[in-house]
Image (cartoon, rainbow, N blue to C red):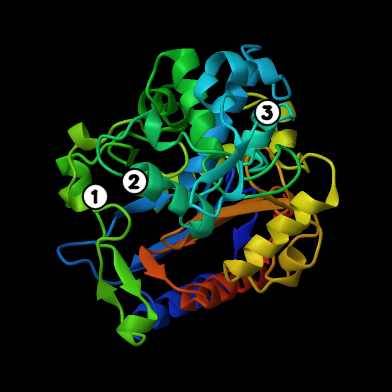
């Protein structure tokens, strides 16, 4: 396929996206905002607008956009035959700290955690589909946050944290539920232990490098060069009465140095430009054919239902999406599930993405999707911590609809 043979945005679509972006930042709906659309052979659209405290906004905190890249790194090792997705001995051998974790079922009357041994096997599939039992403390303050406080444990995003930041009890038997959490972080630890490289080193050698993405574009390390381009984190909460304010967020990257990064977080550690991530997504689209960073066979694992069997994990995922403010009924009520890399939309989305698309995001409102049938991927992002219901999701919905209403498939 050539660039001329891929789908295109009409001129009317380009103008409509320009208008939406301009209105979004001028009306202070969002701080500096980025829109990008790509095909496998290159960009169809990219623009950004808005304010940074100093200079042009370019880079931001990507948070959970890291997860997809980490998942692909693990799947590359599966392709090489070094590990298997459904082999529990992989976890037992290479992640013994995780293998030893019990399940927390509640609390005694005198405030002690009730812990029981895990019975079900634990596999890489569970880690990549968020069905391992691992959670996030901020999503389960009644259990995990309470446990951390009682045990005096530091969070995994704090400076100079090691594997101890991820060692926590499970919330349930692997494979029985879905809970968004640190499973992909553990997959990242697995990659680092098997390769002897940091995630930053591995990603740039085997994923970003082959796609022409440099270390100054996406990295785990807050170098001075990265921080000079970094968009300031913002927030809008009930306490700010709807106004956007500057806020350090969960990690004050602007005041961090590379030496403060301990174990690189495969679930939330990257900073970089959304334009570079868009180039990464273009590389994913190319993997439908041989010669990409993953094989066509692995591509199918990223764009198909790979959750353990049972209705409960899928219901949990749909409930979580609704909790996060998603209003698209194809995701909250439809056939939504998880692949070995992304949230998989078997029925597509009412906002535009076709059946078989997949999506995810970062907590600072950096959302993206990949649509193999339409042959496009897209990003809509900013850097803001915002409570549900979010004004960002309204913009993202309009962005997607504008893209699909103006998409022209090539006749070449």
Secondary structure at badge 2 equals strand
Q: Which of marks 2 and 1 is nearer the N terminus?
A: 1
Q: Residue 122 carries which label?
A: 3
Mark 1, Cα crowd under 10 Å, few <14 / some 14-19 / many 20+, is many
Q: Is residue 52 visible from the viewing direction of this image?
A: yes
**Label 1, label 3: how many angstroms apart (C-alpha)?**
34 Å
The residue nearer to you, when weighing 389 against 110, is 110
Res 34 quadrant in image: bottom left
The x, y position of residue 83, in whole percent, is 64, 16
**Residue 254 appears left or right of 119:** left
**Label 2, label 1: how many angstroms apart (C-alpha)?**
9 Å
Mark 2, Cα crowd under 10 Å, few <14 / some 14-19 / many 20+, is many
The residue nearer to you, when weighing 166 against 395, is 166
Q: Name the residue under label 2.
A: 271
**Residue 387 appears left or right of 230:** right
Q: In the figure, 291 relative to 64: above or below? A: above
Secondary structure at badge 1 equals helix
Q: Name the residue under label 1.
A: 253
């Amino acid at each position: 396929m050539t660039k001329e043979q891929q789908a295109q945005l009409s001129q009317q679509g380009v103008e409509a996206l320009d208008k939406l972006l301009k209105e979004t930042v001028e009306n202070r709906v969002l701080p500096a905002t980025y829109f990008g659309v790509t095909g496998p052979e290159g960009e169809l659209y990219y623009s950004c607008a808005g304010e940074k405290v100093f200079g042009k906004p370019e880079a931001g905190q990507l948070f959970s956009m890291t997860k997809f890249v980490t998942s692909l790194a693990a799947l590359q090792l599966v392709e090489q035959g070094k590990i298997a997705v459904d082999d529990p001995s992989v976890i037992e051998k290479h992640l013994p700290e995780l293998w030893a974790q019990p399940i927390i079922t509640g609390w005694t009357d005198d405030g002690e955690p009730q812990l029981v041994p895990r019975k079900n096997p634990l596999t890489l599939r569970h880690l990549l589909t968020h069905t391992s039992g691992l959670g996030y403390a901020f999503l389960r303050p009644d259990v995990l946050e309470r446990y951390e406080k009682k045990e005096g444990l530091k969070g995994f995003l704090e400076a100079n944290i090691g594997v101890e930041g991820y060692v926590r009890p499970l919330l349930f038997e692997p494979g029985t539920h879905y809970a968004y959490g640190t499973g992909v972080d553990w997959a990242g630890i697995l990659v680092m232990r098997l390769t002897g490289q940091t995630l930053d080193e591995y990603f740039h050698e085997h994923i970003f490098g082959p796609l022409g993405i440099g270390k100054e574009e996406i990295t785990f390390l807050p170098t001075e060069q990265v921080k000079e381009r970094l968009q300031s984190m913002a927030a809008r909460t009930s306490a700010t009465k709807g106004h956007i304010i500057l806020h350090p967020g969960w990690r004050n990257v602007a005041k961090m140095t590379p030496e403060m990064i301990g174990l690189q977080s495969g679930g939330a550690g990257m900073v970089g430009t959304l334009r570079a991530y868009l180039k990464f997504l273009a590389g994913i689209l190319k993997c439908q054919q041989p010669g990409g960073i993953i094989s066509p066979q692995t591509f199918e694992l990223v764009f198909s239902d790979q959750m353990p069997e049972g209705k409960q994990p899928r219901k949990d995922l749909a409930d979580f999406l609704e909790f996060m403010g998603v209003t698209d009924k194809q995701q909250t009520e439809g056939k939504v599930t998880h692949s070995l890399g992304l949230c998989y939309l078997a029925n597509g989305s009412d906002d535009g993405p076709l059946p078989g698309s997949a999506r995810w995001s970062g907590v600072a409102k950096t959302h993206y999707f990949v649509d193999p049938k339409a042959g496009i991927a897209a990003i809509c992002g900013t850097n803001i911590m915002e409570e549900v219901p979010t004004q960002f999701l309204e913009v993202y919905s309009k962005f997607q609809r504008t893209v699909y209403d103006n998409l022209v498939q090539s006749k070449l």
